[in-house]
Image (cartoon, coloured by chain):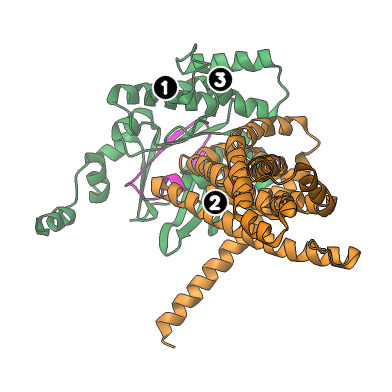
Amino acid sequence: MVVSSTNPSSEDTSPETILELHQVHKRFGPLKVLCGIDLDLCKGQTTVIIGESGAGKSVILKHIVGLLRPDTGTVRFHGERIDNLSERRFAALRMRFGFLFQMGALFDSLTVAENIAFPIVEHSRAKRAAVERIVASKLRMVGLDGIQQKHPAELSGGQRKRVALARAIARDPEVILYDEPTTGLDPVRSDVINELIRKLQRELDVTSIVVTHDMTSAYKVADRIVMIYQGRFIFDGTVEQIKETTDPRVREFVEGRASEDVLRSLHEIEV
Amino acid sequence: MPLPVLATIGAKTTQAADAFGQFWGFAWQMLRWLFAGIPRWKNWQLVMPQFFEVGNRTLPVILITGLFVGMVLAVQSYDQLAEAGFEKRMGVLVNLTLVTELGPVLAGVMLAGRVGGALTAELGTMNVTEQIDALRVMGADPIRHLVVPRFLACLLLTPLLTFFCDVVGALAGWFIAVMLKDVPNGPYWYYVRDAIETWDVMVGFIKSVAFGGAIGLIACYKGFHCRAGAEGVGRACTESFVASFIAILVIDFFMTTFFQGLYKALYGFKSLIS
């Protein structure tokens, strides 16, 4: 069964729907990654996209912020088509998005404060003192005030992710995209990030899209979970619904269990 | 010709054409941001650290190169010129070679090795760690932020580095000729002044500007288009140096031919022997 991940309440692009992906196809050379994805995202909701490594989860995020463009299909933001915007017009639109990259993507040559201040300085004429105040408040929000003068190389993995998150929310975005926010972190640090995602949704009322294959994280932060498999969505529902689903492909994933075919092929390999 | 061979040739040709188009598209975008950004002080602030990286850190290597090239030219040429009785004209050979050819070319090659590789490695690492994507997501253009300052630093500082290479090389050649081989000091400089014109010096500097621009552009392009992983960055650095080196030689040939023809058309043939 292939699921078209469209909110029933938003069939006619009601004001609630903030982002829509319609029949998005993407291929890299001979490799088909997205095969007609449909996804509607509602304001203030946290949607978690799960799926195997290489299934195309990050590719969906990159289509939303225009880092990748669909081969066919459309992406709409507040009802307006954005996938065909020029790079210059998209640059202006991207200020309404925050993006937490998998490895943080902090600029090595800049300090923590300069990293967080970057999107503010780039797009406004704010005074130095005002920028410093915003930086401090964003760092407090992620529980890291006082490390402004450190460089990314001096931070632990968890701290780097939190600084990257502070940078992602520096301009109070409407939508925050999280690309595998807990990858490479121990369970305690992962839980800190999960709590932060919840906290930001509560305090800033942002729409969040989280890409992950960490089910603990998915259960903790999701209002809605969708699963991508071989370029299509095969599940769309709540945390309770995914726990009760009988679809073997979804069950194998959420339980972290390899399929019978994979296990058989492993046993056939002679060592 | 078998079909698979034809298909391979076709695929390679398409790839090469694609890469060529991508490179010039990249260069065009860089030029657009370059001219749009010149009046803004904010952009020049991005160039200053690159001046330090390109200029200050390359100067010692350039000085050592100039020193030894000047000395080698003098040592190599002395015996032959002395045999023919032309040793007083040694300075002409050493300085003209330095100013028009070896100064710009060797400064360019050293810059390609020292700076080009470092620029490709830096941008390549930024690319594979998604820092370039992060810039775009924050609404900043990576070409304006990363490429234009590095290109400008290479373009503007290569002539200056070439000047230092020329001066040190000239002094080194003079030291070998006058201090060690007993060539008289007065005639040495007299022939140099007589033979080398402003034209020669300007041709050398114009060449060095072209070399600097090519090095900066190739290094940034390779960094922006490197493949993922440590191997991808390493390979991009090697490709960057090789492509810059070849570009220097090709540009040198065409510019030498062009300026020689232009000189002849304007002033006629110039003999250094008579």
Disc 3 target residue: A113
Above or below residue B124? Residue A100 is above
User: Depth check: B208 or B42 in front?
Assistant: B208
Judge depth for marks 2 and 3 and give the one in front: 2
Span of residues in magenta: A41-59
Give the chain of mark 1: A
Pick out the residue farthest to the right. B266
Circle 2 crowding by C-alpha within 10 Å: few under 14, some 14–19, many from 20: many
Q: Is residue B103 left or right of residue B61?
A: right
Q: Colour of chain B?
A: orange
Kindly identify the residue that appears in the image at 45 percent across and 78 percent down.
B7
Q: Which chain is green?
A: A
Disc 1 target residue: A155
Kindly identify the residue that appears in the image at 53 percent across and 72 percent down.
B13
Q: Is residue B210 left or right of residue A26?
A: right
Per the image, label 3 sits on a secondary structure element best described as helix
Judge depth for marks 1 and 2 and give the one in front: 2
Could you give the CA–CA distance between mark 1 and mark 2, rounded to whole angstroms? 30 Å
Per the image, label 1 sits on a secondary structure element best described as loop
Kindly identify the residue that appears in the image at 63 percent across and 42 percent down.
B180
